Amino acid sequence: MFTKVLIVVALLSIIASLGTALFYLLMDRNRSPRTVKALTARIGMSLALFFLLLIGYQAGLLHPHGLGAAAVPPPAASAGR
C-alpha cells in the first residue's frame, strides 16, 4: 500500500511541476529561467520514478496486473489431437 501512495504522490508532484512551468511560461515576460528549471525538475522526477518502478518490479515489490488479461479467453484445447 505504501508503494502505491508513493507512486501517486510522485505523479502528482510531476503534474504540479508541469503546471508550475506553464504558469511561469505564461506570466514571466522577462525571459526568466524559472520555466526551464521547472521543466528540468519534472524531467528529473519522471526519470527517478521510472527507475524506481523498474527497481520495484525487479525486487518483487510491484506486480503488473496485465491490461485486459481477464477479457481474453484462454485458448481452447483441441480434442482431436
Image (spheres, rainbow, N blue to C red):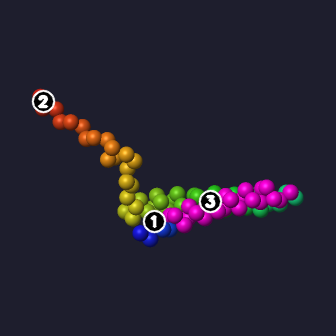
Q: Dot 2 lies on which element?
A: loop
Circles 2, 1 touching at the beta carbon (< 8 Å): no
- Relative to 77, 19 lies left or right: right
Tell me which numbered mark, 2 or 3, is placed earlier along the sequence.
3
- Identify the amino acid type marked 3: Ile
- Horizontal and vertical percent position of residue 58: 40, 59
Q: Is residue 77 magenta?
A: no
- Based on the displayed image, in which of its 4 quarters is residue 9 positioned? bottom right
Residue nearer the viewer, 37 or 72: 72
The magenta segment is: 7-29
Separation of residues labelled 2 and 3 (CA atoms): 55 Å
Q: Dot 3 corresponds to which residue?
A: 15
The residue shown at (78%, 56%) is 25
Q: Quadrant of the C terminus?
A: top left
Instruction: Give the vertical position of 73 relative to 24 (above or below).
Output: above
Of the two numbered discs 2 and 1 in the rendering, the one whose residue sits closer to the viewer: 1
- Identify the amino acid type marked 2: Arg
Of the two numbered discs 2 and 3 in the rendering, the one whose residue sits closer to the viewer: 3
- Horizontal and vertical percent position of residue 28: 83, 59
- Identify the amino acid type marked 1: Lys
Q: Dot 2 corresponds to which residue?
A: 81
